[in-house]
């Protein structure tokens, strides 16, 4: 286990044992904003699903009401007219074979990878590199699309992707500590509502088991929702 700093231990002592209301959790979390940079706020929702069952997987993407507080670097695999369309929409890099080679050679300086359907024959072999990092374009996440302009704009505006991990927990960025409290609350509620709407029919019992908020260099806070 990594050694915790004196600062972290002091903040952890302020976290109560019981779950807090969302408003109180945000107030407490924002009091942890004692670093020289604006910490990213993440949510972790433990779901009552069986991650081993394909019909109980929870994944997708969502445009948060107030974005995530940072500009995401977006690359696009496209050809023909879609190249100019993606560039005009704000893509940081657009390409085909040249972009695939760059990634194979180890370049991964981006946050989102989008592909038009006609490029998946080229992108597919990159799955062994992009997949483990959560960067592989996917129709289910909306990153394989003929409408590359719309999706590029959505990610630039603060769209987040999510998928449950092997423990049945969904993680996502929901903003920064520098956000106003009401904007953080809007983002968090939008994300929670979206996850609630994705409950698999095969899931049994309590769907949302627990919700925790944390920041980059701060302890987690359990939320009662």
Image (spheres, helix red, strand yellow):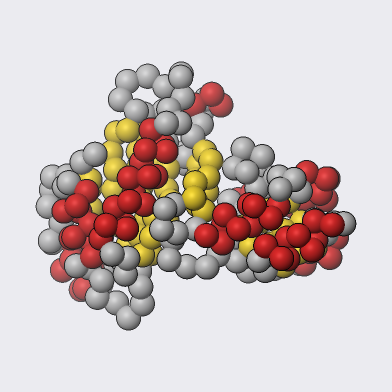
Question: Would residue 51 be seen by someone viewing this image from the given angle?
Answer: no
Query: Which residue is located at x 25 percent, y 71 percent?
Result: 33
The mark total stands at 0
Residue 111: image location, x then y, percent: 58, 61
In the picture, the quarter occupied by the C terminus is top left
Is 66 left or right of 151, judged from the image as shown? left
Residue 223: image location, x then y, percent: 22, 45
Q: Is residue 174 above or below residue 52?
A: below
Query: Which residue is located at x 81 percent, y 49 percent?
Result: 119
Q: Is residue 132 above or below residue 74?
A: above
Q: Is residue 169 above or below residue 8?
A: above
Instruction: Looking at the picture, tell me which residue is in the foreground, 120 or 134.
Output: 120
Instruction: Looking at the picture, tell me which residue is in the foreground, 166 or 170.
Output: 170
Q: Is residue 158 above or below residue 161?
A: below
Instruction: Looking at the picture, tell me which residue is in the foreground, 13 or 196.
Output: 196
Query: Which residue is located at x 18 percent, y 60 percent?
Result: 27
Is 10 left or right of 111, judged from the image as shown? left
Residue 23: image location, x then y, percent: 19, 52
Is 171 left or right of 150, judged from the image as shown? left
* The quadrant where residue 133 appears: bottom right
In the picture, the quarter occupied by the N terminus is bottom left
Residue 201: image location, x then y, percent: 46, 19
Query: Which residue is located at x 41 percent, y 58 percent?
Result: 66
Question: Would residue 210 be seen by someone viewing this image from the given angle?
Answer: yes
């Amino acid at each position: 286990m990594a050694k915790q700093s004196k600062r972290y231990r002091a903040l952890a002592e302020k976290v109560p044992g019981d779950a807090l209301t969302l408003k109180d959790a945000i107030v407490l979390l924002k009091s942890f904003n004692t670093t020289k940079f604006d910490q990213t706020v993440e949510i972790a929702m433990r779901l009552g699903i069986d991650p081993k069952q394909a019909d109980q997987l929870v994944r997708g993407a969502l445009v948060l009401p107030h974005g995530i507080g940072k500009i995401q670097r977006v690359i696009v695999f496209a050809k023909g007219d879609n190249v100019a369309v993606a560039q005009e929409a704000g893509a940081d890099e657009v390409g085909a074979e040249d972009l695939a080679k760059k990634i194979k050679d180890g370049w991964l300086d981006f946050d989102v990878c989008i592909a038009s359907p006609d490029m998946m024959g080229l992108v597919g072999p990159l799955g062994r590199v992009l997949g483990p990092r959560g960067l592989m374009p996917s129709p289910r996440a909306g990153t394989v699309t003929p409408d590359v302009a719309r999706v590029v704009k959505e990610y630039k505006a603060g769209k987040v992707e999510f998928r449950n991990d092997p423990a049945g927990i969904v993680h996502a960025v929901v903003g920064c500590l520098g956000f106003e409290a009401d904007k953080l609350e809007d983002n968090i509620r939008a994300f929670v509502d979206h996850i609630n709407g994705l409950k698999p029919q095969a899931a049994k019992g309590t769907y949302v088991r627990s919700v925790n908020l944390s920041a980059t260099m701060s302890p987690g806070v359990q939320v009662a929702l």
